[in-house]
Amino acid sequence: MKVTLLSLLVTMIGAVSMAQSSKEVKWAFTSKKIADKTYEVRMTATVNNGWHIYSQKVGVDGPIPTAFTFTKNPLVVLEGAPNEVGKVISKNEEVWGGVVRYFEDKVEFIQKVKIKGGKTNLAGKVEYMVCNEEKCLPPAETTFSVAIGG
């Protein structure tokens, strides 16, 4: 009985923590045709005032970098890794023991893809961590699916 209550409590705390991170960052996912069978998938993070989200190349061990995992789709070929478009801030943070890279306000991650057929989608998840000057929230995940082609 104690084990069941303890695991329920841990699950509830984890769910509340992840919900807090998702309140500080809003994600939007869109696609745009840029050439024949070639698309840009834009994954836009809008970050609440006073908070920041880390770069994919954060610079030091410690903070969780933003990371994308794409679901395998035989009709979609990824071209490289997502590019970051936004005002990157590089700052020496003693708590992390070095210079970290992050974004405030808004950042776009742009994944270029080619499709082999007609209409399909690019699906996956993004893992990220947000911090402010006082604290960091536990890492969070957001799943997505973006229509491309057709």
Image (tube, grey):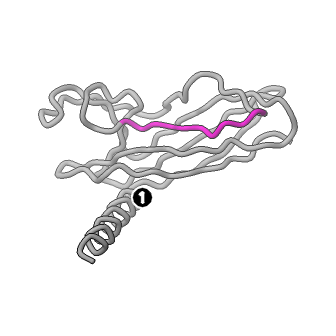
Q: Could you tell me how many numbered marks the image carries? A: 1
Q: Quadrant of residue 89?
A: top left
Residue at horizontal 76 percent and vertical 41 percent from the top: 148
Q: Quadrant of residue 7?
A: bottom left
Find the residue positioned furthest to the top. Answer: 80
Query: In the image, what residue type sits under mark 1?
Result: Ser
Q: Taking 62 as reference, is 60 above or below it?
A: above
Find the residue positioned furthest to the left. Answer: 94
* Magenta stretch contains residue 71: yes
The magenta segment is 65-74
Q: Quadrant of the N terminus?
A: bottom left
Q: Taking 28 as reference, is 20 above or below it?
A: below
Q: Taking 92 as reference, is 124 above or below it?
A: below
* Magenta stretch contains residue 15: no
Where in the figure is residue 87, as x and y percent of width and height?
40, 33
Callout 1 crowding tier (Cα within 10 Å): few <14, some 14–19, many ≥20: some
| Residue named by callout 1 | 22
Where in the figure is residue 24, as x and y percent of width and height?
37, 57
Q: Taking 19 as reference, is 144 above or below it?
A: above
Magenta stretch prevailing secondary structure: loop
In what element is the residue under mark 1? helix
Residue at horizontal 69 percent and vertical 29 percent from the top: 113
- Which of these two is toward me, 18 or 110? 18
- Which of these two is toward me, 61 or 5? 5
Residue 46 placement, left or right of 96 = right
Residue 32 placement, left or right of 36 = left
Where in the figure is residue 53, as x and y percent of width and height?
36, 43
Residue at horizontal 53 percent and vertical 36 percent from the top: 109
Q: Quadrant of residue 15?
A: bottom left
- Which of these two is toward me, 65 or 75? 75
Where in the figure is residue 26, as x and y percent of width and height?
48, 55
- Which of these two is toward me, 5 or 12? 5
